[in-house]
């Protein structure tokens, strides 16, 4: 049995956690086990489930404390003698890839699961680190073609050097459930309302202030419309200020951070996701599986299309234009609600199929490197080590097995 170091970074409830855990739940754990290396300021590490499945959780200093963060990570990689590591932290992967090379990890996989937007502050860091995305990794991976090209470059993709593994969900578990829909709507008092939903972080990337602008226009046209928001984040105060400005306090319900998400996909009548950018959003696949029409911004890759329920609208269009396009589709779908789990499976987004491919990928690359194979893509990069830029120095250990 092989243990793989999963570099999870900051792990909150959301797409990255769901993606990794879907792989972990379905992989053959008699052959492959995951050890999770997470930043200590994470608030969504499913520790109990990981340990129940035979995995281990290590908490390291937050990446903003870069020296301590690297020391902690290096010690874990070195002491456990991993042969494979898989990093899910986008352009920040350059740091663990370097540490993995120093610690002797043979298979170092850097995965891109997101992109960036020039108007978002943290994108400055992403853009600064992106040129180093080829350094120290010997395999590149992405959950969509767009994400792979954004991080590793079009030339790298066209050479076939980026392995695409789709965002996956358990299609059967996320299928539409009419009884769950009725029970949830009754529990929250939504029986006679048209429920528009949003699930995600309240941050610039998700464009939540524009979301409220859109719903304000919907509310003008639909007397029984209600917006239900599930999430948390730094823009929460600004969002509630805008809600008050529009006088929508009775039309918008903020349920905060929750993990019991399945019931809401069933209870909602539409999902709104006007993000500035995404990778391959898990919520987009889950929503469609449950028969929920979802309205993306055109900034989101159309690779997220699983069914006819996926709709794309440009961010240059007005909130009124969004409302005019959304309402007729939602009204029609309410009378035709059904499960789309088969479409999810047919389009390759089911957990079991992709997990089997991922496990075969791990084993084949390990076999290749154990035979002395060398990935030619990294030969030039390895001639330019950045040891002096990223020192590993002694510091307080923050390891929790």
Image: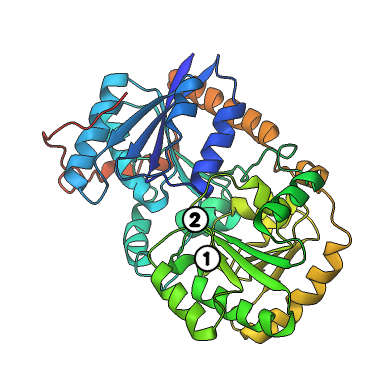
Instruction: Identify the residue shown where x is 74% and y is 48%.
Output: 183
Residue 123 place in picture, x, y as percent: 38, 65
Look at the image and name its color scheme.
rainbow
Q: Is residue 188 left or right of residue 139?
A: right
In the rendered image, the quadrant that contains the C terminus is top left
Q: Mark 1, residues whose alpha carbon is within 10 Å: few (<14), some, or many (≥20)?
A: many
Mark yes or no: residue 282 visible.
yes
Q: Is residue 186 left or right of residue 380?
A: right
Relative to 162, residue 190 above or below: below
Instruction: Identify the residue shown where x is 49% and y is 42%.
Output: 17
Nearer the observer, 319 or 188: 188
Relative to 29, residue 388 above or below: below
Cα separation, mark 2 vs mark 1, equals 8 Å
Residue on which disc 1 sits: 277
Mark yes or no: residue 317 visible.
no
Q: Which residue lies most toward the left here?
A: 394
Relative to 399, residue 10 above or below: below
Secondary structure under tag 2 reads: loop
Residue 243 place in picture, x, y as percent: 51, 78
Secondary structure under tag 1 reads: loop
Residue 120, located in which quarter of the rendered image? bottom left
Looking at the image, do the residues carrying marks 2 and 1 touch, with CB atoms under 8 Å apart?
A: yes
Residue on which disc 2 sits: 114
């Amino acid at each position: 049995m092989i243990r793989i170091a999963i570099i999870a970074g900051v792990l909150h409830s959301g797409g990255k956690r769901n993606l990794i855990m879907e792989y972990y739940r379905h992989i053959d754990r008699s052959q492959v086990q995951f050890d999770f290396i997470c930043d200590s300021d994470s608030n969504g590490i499913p520790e109990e489930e990981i340990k129940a499945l035979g995995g281990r959780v290590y908490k390291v200093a937050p990446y903003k404390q870069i020296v301590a963060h690297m020391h902690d990570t290096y010690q874990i990689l070195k002491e456990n003698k991993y042969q494979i590591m898989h990093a899910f932290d986008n352009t920040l992967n350059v740091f663990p890839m370097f540490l993995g090379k120093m610690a002797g990890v043979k298979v170092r996989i850097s995965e891109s699961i997101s992109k960036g937007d020039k108007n978002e502050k943290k994108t400055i860091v992403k853009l600064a680190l992106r040129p180093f995305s080829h350094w120290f990794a010997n395999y590149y991976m992405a959950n969509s073609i767009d994400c792979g090209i954004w991080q590793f470059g079009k030339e790298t993709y066209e050479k076939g050097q980026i392995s695409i593994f789709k965002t996956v969900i358990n299609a059967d578990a996320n299928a539409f459930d009419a009884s769950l829909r009725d029970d949830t709507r009754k529990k929250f008092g939504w029986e006679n309302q048209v429920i528009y939903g949003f699930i995600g972080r309240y941050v610039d990337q998700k464009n939540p202030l524009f979301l409220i602008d859109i719903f304000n226009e919907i509310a003008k046209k639909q007397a029984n419309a209600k917006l239900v928001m599930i999430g948390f984040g730094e823009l929460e105060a600004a969002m509630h200020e805008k809600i008050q400005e529009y006088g929508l306090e009775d039309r918008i319900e903020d349920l905060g951070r929750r993990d019991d998400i399945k019931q809401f996909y069933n209870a909602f009548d539409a999902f709104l996701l006007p993000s500035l950018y995404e990778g391959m959003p898990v919520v987009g696949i889950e929503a469609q599986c449950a028969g929920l029409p979802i309205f993306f911004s055109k900034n989101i890759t159309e690779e997220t299309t699983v069914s006819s329920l996926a709709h794309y609208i440009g961010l240059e269009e007005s909130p009124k234009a969004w409302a005019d396009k959304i309402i007729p589709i939602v009204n029609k779908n309410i009378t035709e609600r059904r499960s789309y789990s088969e479409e999810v499976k047919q389009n390759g987004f089911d957990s079991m199929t992709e997990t089997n491919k991922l496990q075969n990928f791990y084993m084949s690359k390990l076999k290749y490197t154990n035979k002395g194979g060398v990935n030619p893509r990294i030969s030039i990069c390895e001639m330019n080590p950045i040891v002096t830029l990223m020192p590993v120095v002694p510091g307080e250990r923050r390891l929790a097995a």
